[in-house]
Image (tube, rainbow, N blue to C red):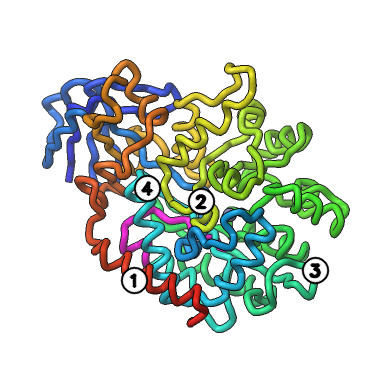
Amino acid sequence: MRSLIYNARLVATMDDRGSELAEGYVLVDGDKIDLVGRGTLPSRVPVDVLMDARGRVILPGLVNTHHHLFQTLTRNVPTVQEAPLFRWLTELYQIWRGIDAETLDAAVRVGLGELLLTGCTTTTDHHYLFPKGTGRLIDVAIAAARDLGIRFHPTRGSMSVGEKEGGLPPADIIQDEDTILADSKRLILEYHDPKPGAMTRIALAPCAPFSVSQDLMRRTAELAREHGVRLHTHLAETLDEEQYCRSRYGYRPVEFLRELDWLGPDVWLAHCVHLNEEEIALFGSTGTAVAHCPSSNFRLGSGVAPVRRLLEAKVPVGLGVDGSSSNDTSNMLAEARQALLAHRSGDDPSRWLTAREVLWMATRGGARCLGRDDIGSLEPGKAADLIMVDTRRLSYAGAGSDILAALVFSPWPEVVDYVMVNGKFVVQNGELQGVDVPRLVDKADRAALALRKGKH
Ligand SMILES: [Zn+2]
């Protein structure tokens, strides 16, 4: 089936040349992009479906590189609204310990729905919470992602060092390391699809230096490399973490990773707020990628990651909304604007991030974090993941001289109008397809309330 989306106000391809095509078209053949161009399609090309994109800007689907979908049910918890990371974590563990398959299912569907509605077509999920007796929670998330039709990179997270052993989490939400590794291997064998166009890929992701052992980090890296899957973790998020690493291991966080053979082109790291020049250069020389999460970093008072310097060192940088307990939304569009504004505090405007750099991070940078060259741009042969934003809105009126930048400078619409993943529209006219949203919200609200009352 060949669908032609034509007459777009602009097609921003995010290809290597940064092509921006006024009166553009995109021809989709099945699950792939076939042609992208300007004006009218050559008449010899057969087409089954025509879609007029008048007034709309077409972009590649956005890529979210860091998230914890389970946290959707613990947004905006009053006791941690003003808490920095370590206190925020230790208080929320008390609620999160009640999460089970049913509550997770609601949380994941809400988070994925928000992501799709805000233009995200590929997301990761860092799931590290396995309360005793809960079983196969990542399988629940994968099933929900398949239902909603989003491209999904769940990461098998882990926590194995509890309070008694000097870590942060309580004993009933950590797992023993053999169990973690066995389940990691099972998930890879059952779900990981290395082929181009894959809808599901697994990565391995011990939670953070303060909740796993060095031995688990080493063994996880070995397992990942044996199976050709990627590695992910939180790193250098706060000065408390730096202090923890120095006192427990005698290293700064990046040195801690280097000693464990955890830097390289198969690794992407969330946050990386507190890096020195040597560490930035090390990321560049090893090809280690960074998931930049500005909203979460602001929310927890963690600081601002040195993104300009990372980009100068040729470090692949993607954008991440991070979990909804530290961002309170899974809105990729809002994250792009946050990234634009986060890097404007210096007195040298030539070092500020531009709207196009932010869009690059949200698409191509994200694809690089996830090790993919088949998503992130609108080019023949790539996966048919695209979004359409109708610019005939009051918020864009008067911004016509650079409508692409306007998408980042002006607050984005609450939802984008059309979202295609793998050749299929999963959002149409700003509505999630096949999801009863009021019913889902009701289910999530009830689950969230029960969780906070400790009834699970
Ligand atoms: Zn996180």
Identify the disc placed on residue 166.
Answer: 3
| x and y percentages locating residue 18 in the rendered image | 41, 23
Q: Compute the Cα span from label 3 to label 4.
A: 39 Å
Label 1 CB less than 8 angstroms from ligand 1: no
Of labels 3 and 4, earlier in sequence is: 4
Of labels 2 and 4, earlier in sequence is: 4
Q: Which residues fall within the magenta stretch?
A: 144-156
Q: How crowded is mark 2: few (under 14 residues within 10 Å), some or many (20 or more)?
A: many
Q: Is residue 392 left or right of residue 126?
A: left
Q: In this view, does 245 lie to the left or right of 388?
A: right
Q: What element carries label 2?
A: loop
- Residue type (three-letter) at the residue carrying disc 4: Thr
- Residue type (three-letter) at the residue carrying disc 2: Asn
| x and y percentages locating residue 456 in the rendered image | 49, 81
- Residue type (three-letter) at the residue carrying disc 3: Gly
| x and y percentages locating residue 289 in the rendered image | 61, 41
Of marks 3 and 4, the one in the foreground? 3
Is 375 situated above or below 166? above
Which residue carries the number 4 mark?
121
Residue at the image position 85 percent from the left and 52 percent from the top: 246
Q: Compute the Cα span from label 3 to label 1.
A: 37 Å
Q: Is mark 1 on a helix, strand or loop?
A: helix
Residue 179 sits in quarter: bottom right
Of marks 3 and 1, the one in the foreground? 1
| x and y percentages locating residue 315 in the rendered image | 62, 34
Which residue carries the number 1 mark?
443
Of 453 and 133, which appears nearest the observer?
453
